[in-house]
Amino acid sequence: MISYLIIDDEPIAHDIIKGYCDLLPNMELKKHCYNALEAMQYLNEHAVDLIFLDLNMPKLKGFDFLKTLSHPPKVIVTTAYQEYALEGYELNISDYLLKPFSFERFLKAINKTVSVASKPAVTIVEKRKETSKSIFLRSQNKYVQVFTDTIHYIEASGNYTKVVTDAETITIREKISDIIALLPSHDFLQVHKSFAVAVKHIKSIEGNRMLIGEHIIPIGKMYKADVNALLR
C-alpha cells in the first residue's frame, strides 16, 4: 500500500488528485493538508511514502516547507508555476506536474516515482525481493499494477505491446519504447526492435535467438553487440 498526503490550499486540487489516486490500486490517502504547517505537524508524528505538494501556499511556501524535512518522502510537485521546476529538481523531487494535468500525465508521474514495498512471497521458483519496483499499465479500461521483477519479456504487436509476466500476458495500447522507458535499465535489455527481455529470465543464447522460459526470442543485428556484452 502506498500512503500519501495532499498538501494544497485549493480544495479542488485535493478532489482531482484523490480522484486520480482512487483509480489506482494500493493508493491510501492519509490526510488532506491545506497548508504546509498542517503537513509538518502530521509528518512529525507519522510517516508516508509520497507527498503531492503545491508550491504557492500561505504562511509557508512548498519548497521552504520541503527544506525543513530532514528525511522527506518522495515528492510530486503539483503547481501552476513552471518557473520553479529547476529548483524542484535540485531538491530531488520525483516529478513536476503543471496544473491542469491529465490523468495520463499523472499516471506517468506515479510510475516514475513509486516503488512498492511488499512482503516476501515464497513461490516454487523464487522469493520476491522485499522491495520491488512496480508500474501501472492500462489494459481494457482498467489500470493493472505489475511488479517489474515478474516480467519475462515485452513484445511489440502492431499498435499494441504485450507484457508477458509470471502469471499472465497483458496487452496494452502503447509503444514498446514507452514501456521500456518505465523499466529498470539494468534489469531489462532490448534485443530486437520488437522485443525487450528481463536479463534474469534468459535461459540460453544461441546464434541469433535466445530462450526465455519456453519462448524463443529473436536477436536483431542492431542489438547483437548488447547481447554479446552479457556473455563477457
Image (cartoon, rainbow, N blue to C red):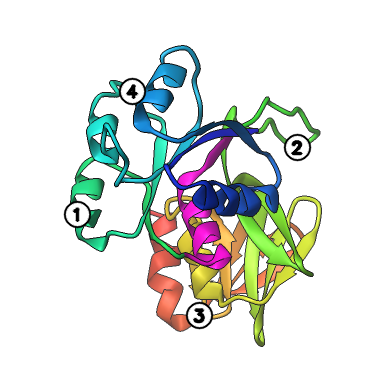
Earlier along the polypeptide chain: callout 3 or callout 1?
Answer: 1
Q: Which residue is mark 4?
A: 71
**In this picture, residue 200 sits left or right of residue 34:** right
Which structural element holds mark 2? Answer: loop
Earlier along the polypeptide chain: callout 2 or callout 3?
Answer: 2
Q: Which residues are magenta?
A: 101-116
Q: CA distance from mark 3 to mark 1?
A: 39 Å
Q: Residue at x 51, y 27 (%)?
A: 48
Q: Residue at x 49, y 68 (%)?
A: 190
Q: Which residue is mark 3?
A: 220
Q: Depth check: 203 or 150 in front?
A: 150
Q: Eyeballing the image, is 57 above or below 140? A: above
Q: Residue 148 location in percent, x, y?
A: 60, 49
Q: Could you tell me the amino acid type at mark 1?
A: Leu
Q: Is residue 115 magenta?
A: yes
**In this picture, residue 191 sits left or right of residue 88:** right
Q: Which residue is mark 1?
A: 86
Q: Which residue is mark 2?
A: 125
Q: Residue at x 38, y 22 (%)?
A: 40
Q: Could you tell me the amino acid type at mark 4?
A: His
Q: Depth check: 152 or 3 in front?
A: 3
Earlier along the polypeptide chain: callout 1 or callout 2?
Answer: 1
Q: Residue 228 location in percent, x, y?
A: 42, 64
